[in-house]
Amino acid sequence: MSAESVHAALLLSYDGRFFQGWQRHPGKRTVQGAVEDAVAAAFGAPALIEGAGRTDRGAHALGQVATVELPGVASEQEIVTRLNEAMEGDVIVEAARHVPPGFHARKDAVGKIYRFALWNEEELPLELERRVWHVHGKLDVDAMAYALGALEGEHDFSSFASSGGFDRKSSVRHLRACTLGAEGPLVEMSFEADGFLYKMVRNMVRAVVRVGEGKRRAEDMPDVIAARDRKAAPGSAPASGLYLDEVHYQEPLFER
């Protein structure tokens, strides 16, 4: 941090229904583009926003973290106020923190929590349109919870990694916790890991729902993992139910 600029981490939330994903793209409305436009408007100069995760088109966030170098000197509260005024509610800056110049939202992350929400009833409330995955047939949530348990731990998750054109040194990830909760027709799954492969959460959710539909045995999940082959698992769950809930760092940045 210098007298001429301030390096800041931003805690962001957004509704993915209104964006074509995170990453900026000419002619498309993206979260990264919206935040960068707000920075330019609020601080009078363009700046690159680096996010902790590239959420898919239609996916949501309650705890996305991004880093940015802002011109001039501004307090943490000033950053929040000025950016929120510029964005007019499209993306909400929940909090801002001054961080060392070398801090990077993605590279310095040590873990993330994603949540997936689905609605298991014939009628979907209007306010949940494109906010959940609407699954009509009755699901066996106990079988789904059992299947989730097999995913926990350190594995090669190649069977759940879609090819997104991203280079990866390894497909091994440590899935620290998988939980399932159901309240009426709302079923939510939470995944905490040191990192995730491209579409890994959506692909795992689809496999678990297949178990809930009675189309796959929960006991087969270890074999799907061991195959290390994308063809061994079914397709992807829709992005509408996916939420980036938290990003973790060695030293906590934000109180949640």
Image (cartoon, rainbow, N blue to C red):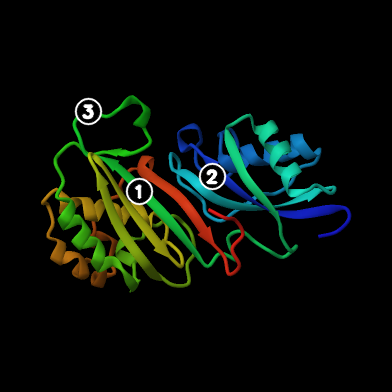
- Measure the alpha-carbon separation of dots 3 and 2: 30 Å
Residue at image location 75% in from the left, 34% down from the top: 41
Amino acid type at mark 3? Glu
Residue at image location 29% in from the left, 61% down from the top: 230
- Measure the alpha-carbon separation of dots 2 and 1: 18 Å
- Measure the alpha-carbon separation of dots 1 and 3: 19 Å
Q: Earlier in the sequence, mark 2 or mark 1?
A: 2
Residue identified by numbered label 3: 123
Q: Is residue 227 above or below residue 236?
A: below
Picture coordinates of residue 201, whole percent (x, y):
36, 55
Left or right of residue 62: residue 171: left
Q: Earlier in the sequence, mark 1 or mark 3?
A: 1
Picture coordinates of residue 101, whole percent (x, y):
75, 62
Amino acid type at mark 2? Trp
Q: In this view, does 61 lie above or below 104?
A: above
Q: In this view, does 229 lie above or below 121?
A: below
Residue identified by numbered label 1: 116
Residue identified by numbered label 2: 22
